[in-house]
Amino acid sequence: IKSPLEHRLTGFLIIFDITNHHKIMRLILRKKQGKLTLKVVGRIGKKPKNSKDYVYMEKVYMRIEKFMRKKTPFLDGDFSIQDLCDSLYMSRSLVSRSINRIGNTNFRSYVNNYRVTYALELMQKDPRVKLSQIASLSGFNSIPSFNSSFKDVMSMCPSEYVRSLQLKEDLRYYSKKKESEPRFVSAPSLQDV
């Protein structure tokens, strides 16, 4: 079994940022001919100290958003903030602060928001799928956590939302059926002739 560091070192090139004395340094770790070399590329920015560095935090947040949308790591029920940090090569405090300040939420709520959004997409595709399957496919480990997260985001229970989707689907079906039915015009009576 490989350690987390060995697992990350299987590639030839790893780029990561570290914070040192209020500076963020970019380091490149290369594996050449079985030897590891570490090279400091340079300073890429200053460590955010207060609200004046809001722009920097926005850039970090956008990087997190892009990763979450492209890679969909939230579908893994065991996804943690440490997994996100390892994937983005960022410190835990930087990721947490950017989600807290820019996203105005904590990490757990942030991830659950993505999961609920994904669940909504699944429900809209097929409202007849069981909620337990939707919860599992969306990355929730339990139905109660799915229900509470869904209610926090949508202000209604998942079952209520599914019922509303089914009602809309039924209304669409019956309105199309009614439009496609031929309309019969009554024949003129003999008195009219």
Image: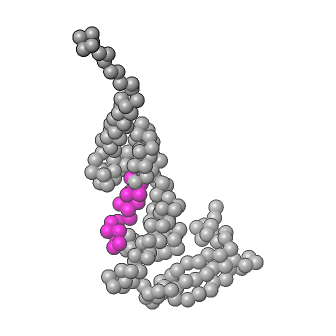
- In this picture, residue 126 sits left or right of residue 170: right
Nearer to the camera, 82 or 187 = 187
In the image, is residue 105 part of the stretch drawn in magenta? yes
Helix, strand or loop for the magenta stretch, by majority: helix
Q: Residue at x 36, y 80 (%)?
A: 54
Q: Is residue 41 above or below residue 109?
A: below
- In this picture, residue 84 sits left or right of residue 113: right
Q: Residue at x 50, y 58 (%)?
A: 72
> Residue 159's spot in the image, x, y percent?
33, 41
> Residue 170's spot in the image, x, y percent?
36, 34
Q: Residue at x 45, y 62 (%)?
A: 80
Q: Give the quadrant of residue 109.
A: bottom left
Q: Is residue 150 above or below residue 61?
A: above
- Quadrant in which the C terminus appears: top left
Nearer to the camera, 34 or 181 = 181
Q: Residue furthest top?
A: 190
> Residue 1's spot in the image, x, y percent?
64, 61
In the image, is residue 64 part of the stretch drawn in magenta? no
- In this picture, residue 1 sits left or right of residue 77: right
Q: Residue furthest right?
A: 33
Chain part drawn in magenta: 100-116
Q: Residue at x 38, y 33 (%)?
A: 176
**Res 135 seen here:** no
